[in-house]
Amino acid sequence: MKRIALAAVTLLSACGQLPGPSVPYQPGQNLDSARAAFQACAPTAPKSGQNAVIGSYAGGFVLAGLIGVVAVAVSEDDIRTNGEYNGVDRCLSRYGFERRELTGAELQRLNTSTPEQRRVLLDQLVGSGLQQTASNSF
């Protein structure tokens, strides 16, 4: 019964939407510390993606036989990508960071800022999560 539940969760996790533009967030941190944590975690992505695919194939076969395997094969790229995102997120959480989705206004502000303004804004988003604080500093 535990295997079936695990397989179902694995298949359902592959159906989730991929995150949009985001930054690692941890109070008191800055862009440099977030970048260092991300660079340390990035190598875990391929293995996490591969594990998600393997788990989905196994779960698909246990739950639905060959039909489950075919269903996983159709969405293998999405499953792999979602697994990679989740693996990096798990790794970043060990460094104390969590994913913070950017709002449309924040993304627009980043895209229209000079490199210096962008760095200040990203420092604020990583460390405090507040765009207004960064906006007021310009």
Image (cartoon, helix red, strand yellow):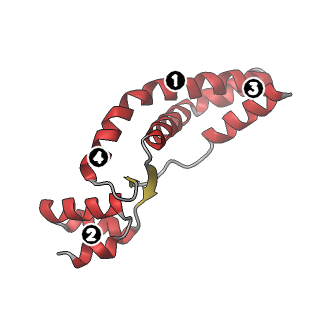
Circle 2 is placed at which residue position? 109
Closer to the chain start, of discs 3 and 1, is: 1
Residue 56 image offset from top left, x and y in percent: 65, 27
Circle 3 is placed at which residue position? 67
In this rendering, the answer to whether 130 lies above or below 57 is below
How dense is the environment of label 1, judged by Cα within 10 Å: few (below 14), some, or many (20 and up)? some
In this rendering, the answer to whether 133 lies above or below 63 is below
Closer to the chain start, of discs 4 and 2, is: 4
The mark lying in front, picked from 3 and 2, is 2
Task: Tell me the element at label 1.
Answer: helix
Task: Tell me the element at label 4.
Answer: helix
Closer to the chain start, of discs 2 and 1, is: 1
Q: Nearer the viewer, residue 57 or 101?
A: 101
The mark lying in front, picked from 4 and 2, is 4
Residue 100 as seen in the image, left or right of residue 14: left
Q: Residue at x 73, y 30 (%)?
A: 7
Residue 34 image offset from top left, x and y in percent: 32, 47
Q: Nearer the viewer, residue 95 or 121?
A: 95
Residue 138 as seen in the image, left or right of residue 22: left
Q: Residue at x 17, y 66 (%)?
A: 117
Circle 1 is placed at which residue position? 50
